[in-house]
Image (tube, helix red, strand yellow):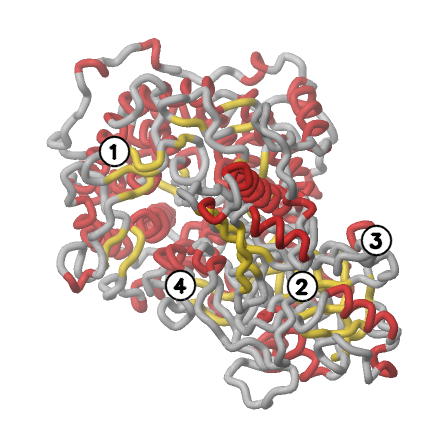
Amino acid sequence: MSAVLFLLTLLGGLCSHGHTMTREEKHRLRNQVVEMFDHAYQNYMDHAYPADELMPLTCRGRVRGLEPSRGDIDDALGKFSLTLIDTLDTLVLLNKTTEFEAAVRRVLSDVRLDNDIVVSVFETNIRVLGGLLGGHSMALMLKEGGQHMQWYQDELLHMAKDLGLRLLPAFNTSSGLPYPRVNLKYGVRGPETRTGTETDTCTACAGTIILEFAALSRFTGDPVFEAHARRAMDFLWEKRQRNSNLVGTTINIHSGEWVRRDSGVGAGIDSYYEYLLKAYILLGDDLFLQRFNIHYASIMKYISQPPLLLDVHIHKPLLPARTWMDSLLAFFPGLQVLKGDIRPAIETHEMLYQVTKKHNFLPEAFTTDFRVHWAQHPLRPEFAESTYFLYKATGDPYYLEAGRTILDNLNRFARVPCGFAAMKDVRTGSHEDRMDSFFLAEMFKYLFLLFADNEDLPFDVEDYVFTTEAHLLPLSLSTAPHSSSIPSNRTSEEELDDSNFDWTCPNTRLLFPDPAFPRNLREPIRTAVDKSCPRPAPYREPGMGSPPLRAQDFMANNPEHLELLRRMGVSLIHLKDGRVQLVQHATQAVSAVAAEDGVRFMQEMMELSSQQQKEQLPPRAIQIVSHPFFGRVVLTAGPAQFGTDLSKSSTGVRGFVTVAEPYSGCTEITNAEYVQGHIALLQRGQCMFAEKARHIQKAGAIGGIVIDDNEGSSSDTAPLFQMAGDGRSTDDITLPLLFLFHKEGNILLEALKEYREVEVLLSDKARDRGVDVQEAEEGCVTEAVTPTSFEPVSQSQMSTVELDEPAPEEVTPSQEEVSPLSEETSPAEEVPPPEEEVSPADLSEPKEERDSERKTEEPEGDTDSSSQSVDELLADWREDLEAFQQMEKDEL
């Protein structure tokens, strides 16, 4: 039955409609996919192996413990050559049999699974256990072919069972839900494990085990793995909200209480639903299909608002839980294809495609009006996955063009000499020194399958099911011997009811009698995404008068405003990093009415802060275009509220940089002969931003870059802000002024030390480098803002807001209950503030998005530095540059 469902879903493609892609063009794109895979895989093997992952900007391996911790994201790394294991079955699919055989031998000889290291149960299961099982499946298939892997004696399966046994201690809970982490050597009990104290796990983390564990049981004949995975799935089903039939995002592994009650199909839940349907496909157990269909009906009733998929509360499913979507839900149209529900799959995929075309990649999160919410993109494959499944279901060449878009954007914006780098900010094109293993495991599988013909494939993919990591498990496992001792947790209320089954998928020819029907579904969605929907004004209660001072009018250097704040019980505290903090004590207000005004002022300030970060503060880009960078280094910069608006400039401002004297820019420039016609570098502090701009403009500069004087600051850990004026007209300032945090600024200063003449482009976003420049691309070492949702928390008798520059419109949200404005402080001394403790913005940084920080020098400090010079960073890249140039020429 399982094979029937899977095969019927993928067959019955429509007759072509739209512009048909020629066979030659499909073959060219197929070959391009293979070339891109070779570029990523070979650079991992050359520069990173045996490390878990490649750092493509610095051309080295990421070894846990040797690189600065990135928090939870590092739990996927276990010193077990993660990328190599995750890539095994991709090698076979792409007809790289010789490389696969060599890779298997490397895994068997080099990889250890008994490391004293704490890893994520979820990530290790889907990537490593799944990779070993996928590799084993491919090895068996090749061995049966009689030409390759004749020496193979189930060694990968033995490693998989060893790993499975090391993961089993995590399931030793009263509920059967696994601990989120396990020590590969010591398990979860005892002080030496350094884990086992967690109480919560995500639904997907506990519910994305069954495919790998059941396959391991059926390959080995040991039922213990499948039994534990089934018990976890059964517990999640039992804990669903019985009225809505939805599950929450986070659950207590001991009590089964929902910790986070929001429900969607994206991060935290996604692959739980996927594994219910695919467990039926792989194992043939009708119970999984019944449960999936019940969940799916609720998803379509409450969460699906075509083309959107919005989280709701499980107890009040008609109440939205958020106004944004995360990129992980991009897998869902592909799952709907497997389900046979093609129409909503087309609609949601089209929405995702238009967002992709708007931002080049799917932002990690985006709002319901399709603007960036979280700007990073770690080269996730889910959109490519859904594109492939929709093409298989419809045969519509439109999806081949969508695949071409993915390829082009990866090559134009993510490709660097040492691989492909994750996008730190899709708005500016800045990179992160990261290439996750799933990029090789999933992206290239789906893209190759999209463009390949059946004769290009070494086996029939319809004999396999894809795991959530795109590992291939044979459908023949459904008939493999397995112990009848695996308990059935079917309750009396779960007696099989035919009304809960879709035994076959609808025939797509009958579903779409008009070949233009899918196009008609897409058209209104494309129009909706193209429009920028205005946000509603913040809600204000009827009868509540306006406070005497509005947040948008506040200026931190206006004495009258400060007096109004004092009367409302609001005090202003200067922080050492240049920001100011607003704190309200209702008891210190001059009257009860003034206290109420103060509360409303603080609420307005936080609302204004959140609104402007999400809507009105697109970052700017500083792109180093001179040799040897050639446009690949893109630094994320903050804009100014005055001077040239780079968002309205089609060309930006391009010029060589020079350090202004004095560096503060607070008095007349003494090296005007060098500043004239150049972009001046300035240090933050000692005077207003507008004053600095006027001084360099008078000296003849064509632009300015202000570098933060707070050592160690970075857009990675602090929100960008707009540099404000000085309380009077700034119409006289006509040059562009941008702001860089200390870390990004020192990348520019370091380049200036190494290469005397450094040319940059100031613009609203990174410009397309073009073919000639792409041939000499060198990689990017930049950071970018990672905004999070902003939810003020009420405090009794006290409210706090942080500011950073005295002007009306410059409020930007930090990532806690604070709102920085941009303020230039005026310290009496000229010495920069000392390095200080972590700021509130640092504390709120998402663990998964912390990146390694480079230590850099002050512009006029000692040249002795522990950081790598730009020359050293580029030296490793030059070796690959010639081959990279040739590849680009061949491609043309």
Q: Is residue 728 left or right of residue 70?
A: right
Measured from the top left, where is residue 747 in percent x and y? Answer: 62, 73
CA gap, disc 1 and disc 3: 54 Å
The answer to which of marks 1 and 2 sits earlier in the sequence is 1
In the image, residue 757 above or below residue 850: below
Toward the left, the furthest residue is: 485
In this rendered view, identify the residue nearer to me: 647 or 499: 647
Look at 64% across and 57% down and name the residue there: 556
Q: Amino acid at mark 3?
A: Ser
Q: Amino acid at mark 2?
A: Val
The answer to which of marks 2 and 4 sits earlier in the sequence is 4
Residue labelled with disc 4: 52
Residue labelled with disc 2: 634
Q: Amino acid at mark 4?
A: Asp
User: Which of label 4 and label 3 is nearer to you?
Assistant: 3
Choose top left, top right, bottom left or bottom right for residue 188.
bottom left
Image marks 4 and 3: residues in contact by CB distance under 8 Å: no
The answer to which of marks 1 and 4 sits earlier in the sequence is 4
Residue 649's label in the rendered image is 3
CA gap, disc 4 and disc 3: 43 Å
Residue 257's label in the rendered image is 1
Q: Residues within 10 Å of mark 2 (few under 14, many from 20)?
A: many
Measured from the top left, where is residue 191 in percent x and y? Answer: 15, 62
